[in-house]
Amino acid sequence: MSLERQVRLKLAGKRDAEQEKEAMEWIESVLGEKLFNRGESYEDVLRDGQVLCRLMNKIQPGSVAKINKSGGQFKMMENINLFQQALKSYGVADLDVFQTVDLYEKKDIAQVTTTLFALGRTTYRHPEWQGPYLGPRPAEENKRDFSEEQLRAGEGIIGLQAGQNKGASQAGQSLGATRKILLGK
């Protein structure tokens, strides 16, 4: 088996059909139209970048100025690049954004799904977006400020991990037979 085939099989194994279905349903609910037919695959619908650009414009109006509807391979890849730029300006972390070839050449579709989930999580942080949402709500910072007096009060407490448990020990307990040492055997 060639190395390239092994890599393709490994990447295909990372795909999660349930997540892809959830992402497809989310895209359709945001855009308000049926995009995914039985005959077309998930990656084929997204491949030219038009759906992704429309999705981004629906979430943040005006974020993709021009969507290329015709043209060759270069124009379709430009749509994907425009979508990626809009993602980053919206607040999706660089490490969550897929590479253009991951989608256009169908190299790593699982990473495309991961990017859509990252976009779905980022929408929670934008109060102007009223839904629908994709994925779990991200945790919010819960910063606490302790006064100097509260910090000093904690210094007098001995934690149970320090080896002291208020005099409790296992002395006097014997469960089962005691250990016998037999010499000479």
Image (cartoon, rainbow, N blue to C red):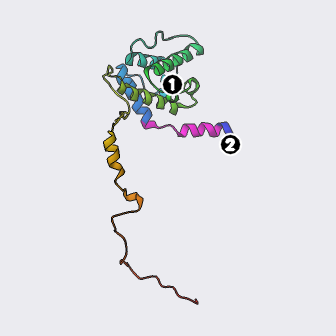
Give the residue furthest to the right. 2
Quadrant showing the N terminus: top right
Closer to the N terminus: mark 2 or mark 1? 2
Residue lying furthest bottom: 184
> Left or right: where does residue 108 sit relative to residue 142?
right
Q: Which residues are magenta?
A: 5-18
* Residue 37 sits in quarter: top left
Q: Amino acid at mark 2?
A: Met
For disc 2, the neighbor class at 10 Å (few under 14, some 14 to 19, many from 20) is few
The disc placed on residue 1 is 2
State the SS at label 1. Answer: helix
Q: Quadrant of residue 133?
A: top left
- Residue 63 seen anywhere in this rendered image of the structure: yes
The residue shown at (56%, 23%) is: 100
Q: Main secondary structure of the magenta part?
A: helix
Whether 133 is drawn above or below 50: the answer is: below
Instruction: Tell me the tag on residue 87.
Output: none
Identified by mark 1, the residue type is: Asp
Residue under pointer 1: 44
